[in-house]
Image (tube, rainbow, N blue to C red):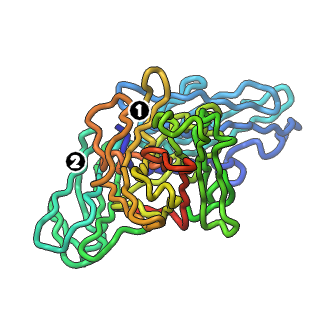
Amino acid sequence: MWSQTTQFKPRAVALACAAVLAGCGGGGGGSDGTKVQAVEFNYPGGMTVAVPPTVATTRLVATASGGGAVTFSSNTPDTCTVSGDTLSLVKAGECSVTASQAGGNGYAPASSRQLFVIPKIKSQLVFRNPGWQPLDKTAVQLAATSDKGFPISYASKTTDVCTISGTTLTKVTNGMCTVTASAQGDDYYATMTVDRNIPIGTATASVLTFLTGYKDAQHSNEGVIGRPGNQYWCPDACYQKASSDGKSYTYSVTFGAQPKPSDWDYYYAPQFFLFAPGLTESNLDPDSGYPVGDFRPGAMGLRIDAQAALKFNLAENNEWFTSANNKFNVELGISHFTTKDGKACHVMLKATVQPTAVAADYSVSLKDKFTVSESCGLSGLDVWNELQDYSIAEIRFSAVAANDTSGYKTEFTLTGPIVFQ
């Protein structure tokens, strides 16, 4: 299972020979009247060191303007070695390589150097937020794991709010407790760190905004609005509109006398999707309207830290609200991707909501109200772990049952932002 890790950003800088490194050669013609030539040396960096007995290698590529053969040599053989045009990465650190052309055929000798950093390998560090904690004397046990089995240490960045001894967190006062979990690496794996913000007492998690408003009937300010494309009757039965001020979005389905809503199964129940920032029309299957592709964590969507609830304002049309079954579902499409029956599948979390008024503000607890509605054939999935380990790529609203009273109109109206807090 993928988990959030702090991104390791290797410093990989190709240093131009003439500008940075002295004694490169090729800066002028020879005293014997030979012509100047230049060596163009492609940047060879970007790979990480490998764990022995495996050795990471890459092919060196350089050309001389005079057309002669180019040879390579390592200036840092403890870090990287050269054999022919093959560069072997021995260990993490700075690697310096020179590409040389010996001259001849009327050209003076020339060379060019590349200097770059060989980074260590990134491992995975899983540190899930325990969530809001009451201000009391009950200690909180911290738990993080390294996929390579490295020892974990914890430190408080807010010692006025919380202190840490070993794996035990002690609450000091109301506020946001920021804890860093660290997995110490070795000669080949980088040290990884993950920060978690834990609200204590009266403190609340920061607001994580999914969308702020609506551009038009197919787009929020941040993403795309979709619906199942296989609802082939929707061009006539569906209505979508964003308000002129961009604050509201309305989606409705009106059945004719035939077929009645009872003749349709849940798959055809009124439903629409709101996609996270970063997802575009290219991520939607034109036939089904559902997201396709491998939504890897971090690539798109929102990541939950200590946010405890999904908050939004939703209205139903009065006819539907006063019907026998006016409940609606809220589903979260998680970037936990796999295949099921040979097709792409994303884990889904669902909460069923009983409306309290025609229009109301809702706060749906992530831990308590959501369950796994689509497991993609996986077992042992936990809602909070899914939210911690993967990003939220989609929010789906649907009617539990379409309105079956006179007129058969089932209408949703969202007003204002949709946030997690």
Task: Give SS at disc 1.
Answer: loop
In the rendering, at what x and y percent does residue 25 appear?
72, 43
Residue type (three-letter) at the residue carrying disc 2: Pro
Query: Of all residues shown, which one is farthest toward the right?
Result: 33
Residue 290 visible? The answer is yes
Residue type (three-letter) at the residue carrying disc 1: Ala
Q: Earlier in the sequence, mark 1 or mark 2?
A: 1
- Residue 174's label in the rendered image is none
Task: Please name which of the two marks, 1 or 2, marks the residue nearer to the observer.
Answer: 2
Residue tagged 1? 50
Q: Tell me the distance, in whole angstroms, between the alpha carbons under discs 1 and 2.
A: 21 Å
Disc 2 residue crowd, few under 14, some 14–19, many 20+, Cα 10 Å? few
Residue tagged 2? 151
Disc 1 residue crowd, few under 14, some 14–19, many 20+, Cα 10 Å? many
**Which residue is nearer to you in this view: 292 or 35?**
292
**Which residue is nearer to you in this view: 348 or 184?**
348
Q: Are marks 1 and 2 in contact (CB under 8 Å)?
A: no
Q: Quadrant of the C terminus?
A: bottom left
In the rendering, at what x and y percent does residue 255 appear?
59, 43
Task: Give SS at disc 2.
Answer: loop
**Which residue is nearer to you in this view: 403 or 239?**
403
- Rendered view: 362 above or below 29: below
Query: Of all residues shown, which one is farthest toward the top?
Result: 342
